[in-house]
Amino acid sequence: MSGPDARRPQASRHAAGATVGPGEDEHWIPAKNRFSRVVFGFPDLTGDAWCSLRFRLGWDAEEAAAGALDFALVGIDCLAPDGSSLDFDHVPGLDRTLLDPHGTWIPGPAYLPAEARALRAGICRLAFLLPAPAAAITVTIRSWRNTSPFTVAEATLAQGGPSPSPRVRRRLAPEPDWIVHALVPGCGLVLRGQIFTAVPRSHAALARVVYRDAAGAALEPPYPGTISVPSLGALVDLSAHQQARRFTLELAPVPGAERVEVGFATWDAGSPDAELLAAPEIALEDRLRLENLCGDDALDAPDFLARIAERLDLPVASIAGWCPGPEAAAIPQVLALARDLQRGEGAPRTGLDRVLRLGSQTAWTVPERPDWSEDPFRSVAWRIEYQGLGWLVALAGTPGGAATALGLAVSWSRANPWGSPADGLALHPSALATRTETLVHLLGRAGTPGSAAALVLTGEVVRHGFALAEIVGQNTFGRSLHQIQAAAVLHGVARALPRLPLAAHWLGLAEAGLRAGVESQLDAEGRFAAPSLHQRLELATLLRVLARSVGDDGLAGFLSGRVAKVLPGLAGLLDPGGRLPPFGDTPANGDAAGWIGRLVARSGSTLVAERRDPRGRPAASAPPLPSDAGTDMIAARSDAPGRGWSHFACTFTGQTSTGQGHRDCTSFVHASEGVRWVVEAGSSAQIETGPARHHILSAHGHNVAWPDGCEPGAGAARLAGAIRLDGAQACAIATTVHGPAYDHRRVFVLLDDLSGLAVLDRFTAGDGPVTFEGLVHFGPDIVAALAGPRRAMAQSGRARLSVVPVALTGRTAGLSLAIGCNEHPGGLRGFVSDGGGPLRPASVLRYAIAGRTGACGGVILGSDASGEARLARLVTEAAVSGLLAGR
């Protein structure tokens, strides 16, 4: 359903062979990958509101790429009211792309419903939040992996109401918004960004510039490339002939300058509104960019150092002085320390036998002369960890192992000239950061500074440092852990190489990058941007280690304050068996309770990451109350004597971080009598690929509901209320993940001992009819069967769980079970991931509710008849009806 306010594009244009199609409102796009495209314009939109784009995709019978996850690309360009393009650093629901500012992939036709494949035409939907001050968009649908032409028809866009969480805007005022950076001697600094002004004019904004010497004293203007105004000092005028104006500030330091301060501001209080759309990108001048330093030459590491000296007009002999001594080994390895906290002391380590045990793979012996393209397990995760070289640290710490570790590090450097790696995954950001940190540590064991091994490792560390600095300065990986890891390791590189001319610049860049990265992923109230609990715990662990390692009291306090707010919430989500709910990407077989326990112990907190005591605990005097603890999740647990432990958790994290995330908003897990009945699929982006990955991410891999075939997409969700009932509690979640055409609420009714619960959804679409379906995934070791048209039974040993559909508005419209169905790539049903291999078949229960003017209902899950009867009575109470209706 496109909604009553769906609008058609006001204009369309074609490129690279695309043209008008044979049908009405249809466009034909040939297989000229990346270039053939149709572009739609949608003006007069509202900023800070969710958008839902819908179109019909048609394809050729001979299409050979129907199973590609990147069959086509939808690009979105956000426009100011005057049509100028806005460079947002993040658009919720979309990813940054190379050809378009933002976008998302459209999977091939094989992933559409069976009825669509029979007709060779199906509906594609995507959603995103249009950030203010944007007032229009262009939508580009381009050929990508298709082998035959495809068609796009009936494109429409609908908008919902204003977002409750609008974009934080960086508005300018007469008082400057200052940015401070250390300089590289003899090298200029380049800042690139964009301002938006409501009224284009010749003096839209300004950038004040102040150079300071080593003592912090301001150096008197004039400065190259600036003008001087008596009351403001040196500045660069930022004129704007349209509302969005990109700028490039090329700062040429004056003699004696050690750092520069740039302050963005308006000219006076009466100036029209102006804002920075994002933090400016920071880069060195072109001659000191990594691409230009390496050029087309296969430079070895010492020659790379010599080229830097040449570009900075320094004698080549000076590079020996850049090599650190044994003190480099004392620089904290923040990524390694974080891994140790995660894995514990029992994790396998590499010794003199050169045997590697990486990830979930079996043992493998490193060859005497590796060529560094090894891939013995056909595993992406293994290759990334292998290329990261983190395993060399344990080898170097083994008596007699330092020389072997150094030899392998030098071997890696010689086999991997920059730009021509033996394995492309060596450039993965995780491998890059880990390897850099490892090489820094090994530098402290390389013997005399300036020796052959020291020069090779120093050159490799510096080359990696340039790559990390460009990642940090350009915000390459945006709101991800990779961005913070890059800044953290760059910080260590700068501290390890204090005599390198770039050290001070890198140190300041890293500290600014750490602050910006943390702000984007973990706000001051303790709210995470990442939906995955595993990724949240990874971030908290890294920040805890950094807070003890950075050596800057201000930065350390900032990091410690953020971590202190989130640890109680993370620990509170553990089930009594010591596991975190596997929402989002979650590698299997981890010890979350042990991990949190080690993390808490390092913090000096009295908080305990609790596992279940096998003797049980006395019954609590008060019922377990759910708490979202700032995590966008609800959790409740119980461990009554004689019944075994019980647990419930659900996530209502908005689908905002990426266009390719899990569609799991309102999904839940449930355990009773010590049995994990209802499970999440679990997954890892480094394990599952192709159809398996598509299934795990899709709504069909989660315990969610959706109306009229409109599967959940990007959108927002919030806790909409919680009430006490007789011996139970109820919580309501309101979402927008099904688009503006639907109003949706999900209510959970939980018995106090968690022996049973009801899952209820209410969907309305104006006064129109609605049919929704919901899923419940059972664990792979659970036996499930239908016991009639209105009942399913699940069994584990002697424990049983009954599942009964209930309709509060409308009627029940079916109950079915599937297990391990895989007729076609888009038809996977009844699978979960164990994180270490192929998906495992598991029973999934599908239920449906239909109504003429909306639909409301769900399922009751009970471990005994009395609990089931209590829930059947509770779900009909007026208080629950009020939660469902939003009263």
Image (spheres, grey):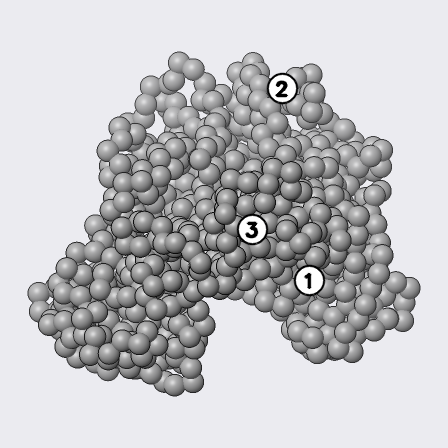
Q: Nearer the viewer, mark 2 or mark 1?
A: 1
Where's the C terminus, which quadrant? Answer: top right
Amino acid type of the residue tagged 2 in the rendering: Leu
Amino acid type of the residue tagged 3 in the rendering: Leu
Residue 169 in percent (x, y) is at 58, 42
Neighbours of disc 1 within 10 Å: few (<14), some (14-19), many (20+): many
Q: Which residue lies at the image location 42% right of the left edge and 52% below the top edge?
A: 210
Quarter of the view holding residue 410:
bottom left
Query: Which numbered disc covers residue 74?
Result: 1
Residue 215 in percent (x, y) is at 27, 50
Amino acid type of the residue tagged 1 in the rendering: Val
Determine the secondary structure under disc 2: helix
Residue corresponding to mark 2: 874
Neighbours of disc 2 within 10 Å: few (<14), some (14-19), many (20+): many
Residue corresponding to mark 3: 206
Q: Which residue lies at the image location 23% right of the left edge and 61% below the top edge?
A: 498
Q: Is residue 313 left or right of residue 799?
A: left
Q: Which sits earlier in the primary sequence, circle 3 or circle 2? A: 3
Residue 403 seen by the camera: yes
Q: Is residue 468 left or right of residue 125?
A: left
Residue 711 in percent (x, y) is at 68, 48
Depth check: give the residue in front, 491 or 282.
282
Residue 139 in percent (x, y) is at 73, 60
Q: Which sits earlier in the primary sequence, circle 1 or circle 3? A: 1
Determine the secondary structure under disc 1: strand
Depth check: give the residue in front, 436 or 603.
436
